[in-house]
Image (cartoon, grey):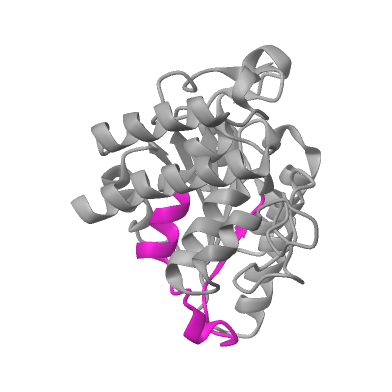
């Protein structure tokens, strides 16, 4: 597992480098989601360039679209496109938009970024796979601020009604959204009880930035006819001391000095 821990450290460095070069983007929410996305692609799901057109491939939908730099880093590492292209993030005519665009870049299942809509798209994919009797797993990642959107709960009702045991909804519970703590802006209450009330099996990950705990949650067998929700408690800005827990870093990127300090810290910690 040490190799995957190192991989996550490398992704964080790559993400911050991309954001520094683009001069815009989302640092905090990208860093909190690294293990959640990496665990899906490197271990839990069957998604590779060679099976990209296979209708039986698994699907990952990044509903939390502003964490796109993490997804781009992983897709490049897997060989969906050349790593040199990462330096074009958010630049004019780049395929690496600020939010994922399925019409521009291989490996992207759905264009996302309008909060909550990726969840509905993923539910539709899971419904289609069930209807066609395909052995497809569908994962989608949402932020805890994102689930304040009503469309999320409509999708959850559908997932339960259609007994989508091939569907996993992951919530990056880092506690912060654009302009403050989630609980101060629009409290969501007891998330476990809420998702259970919507018909989900709920798995809580106490440390969603611990890759072992993430993989353990992902490996849990599906409960027949029941969708699954994974509540992963993370740290916004994880890995860089001056970014962690800081709401101001939601939509801020590191300058050159901050990038150098962050890279040194990540290299030293090897988190």
Q: Position of residue 224 (x, y in %)?
A: 46, 64
Is residue 109 located in the magenta-colored stretch of the structure?
Answer: no
Q: Position of residue 33 (x, y in %)?
A: 49, 42
Q: Nearer the viewer, residue 157 or 261?
A: 261
Residue 165 visible (yes or no): no
264 on left or right of 125:
left
> What residue sits 65% from the left and 28% below the top?
252
Residue 42 drawn above or below residue 87: below
> What residue sits 74% from the left and 70% below the top?
104
Most extreme residue toward the front is 256
Residue 266 visible (yes or no): yes
Residue 103 drawn above or below residue 87: below
What is the magenta range? 36-63
Most extreme residue toward the left is 2
Residue 231 drawn above or below residue 236: below
> What residue sits 27% from the left and 49% below the top?
6
Is residue 60 located in the magenta-colored stretch of the structure?
Answer: yes
100 on left or right of 234:
right
Q: Position of residue 10 (x, y in %)?
A: 37, 48
> What residue sits 69% from the left and 36% below the top?
146
Q: For the image shown, how many numbered marks are present on the structure? A: 0
95 on left or right of 59:
right
Q: Position of residue 249 (x, y in %)?
A: 60, 24
Q: Nearer the viewer, residue 3 or 81?
A: 81
User: Based on the displayed image, in which of its 4 quarters is residue 55 positioned?
Assistant: bottom right
Q: Nearer the viewer, residue 81 or 234?
A: 81
């Amino acid at each position: 597992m040490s190799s995957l821990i190192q991989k996550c450290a490398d992704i964080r460095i790559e993400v911050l480098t991309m954001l520094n070069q683009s001069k815009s983007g989302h640092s905090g929410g990208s860093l909190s989601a690294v293990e959640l996305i990496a665990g899906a692609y490197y271990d839990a799901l069957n998604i590779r360039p060679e099976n990209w057109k296979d209708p039986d491939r698994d699907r990952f939908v990044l509903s939390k679209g502003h964490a796109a730099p993490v997804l781009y880093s992983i897709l490049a590492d897997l060989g969906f496109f050349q790593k040199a292209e990462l330096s074009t993030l958010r630049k004019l005519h780049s395929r690496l938009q600020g939010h994922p665009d399925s019409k521009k870049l291989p490996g992207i299942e759905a264009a996302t970024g309008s909060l909550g809509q990726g969840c509905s798209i993923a539910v539709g994919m899971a419904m289609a796979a069930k209807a066609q009797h395909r052995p497809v797993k569908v994962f989608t990642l949402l932020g805890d601020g994102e689930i304040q959107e009503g469309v999320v709960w409509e999708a959850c009702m559908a997932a339960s009604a259609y007994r989508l045991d091939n569907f996993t909804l992951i919530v990056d519970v880092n506690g912060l959204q654009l302009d403050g703590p989630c609980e101060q802006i629009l409290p969501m209450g007891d998330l476990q009880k809420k998702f259970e009330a919507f018909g989900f099996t709920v798995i809580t990950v106490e440390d969603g930035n611990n890759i072992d705990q993430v993989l353990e949650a992902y490996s849990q067998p599906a409960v027949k006819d029941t969708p699954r929700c994974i509540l992963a408690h993370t740290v916004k800005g994880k890995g860089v001391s001056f970014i962690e827990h800081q709401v101001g870093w939601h939509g801020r990127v590191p300058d050159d000095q901050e990038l150098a300090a962050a890279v040194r810290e990540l290299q030293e910690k090897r988190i």
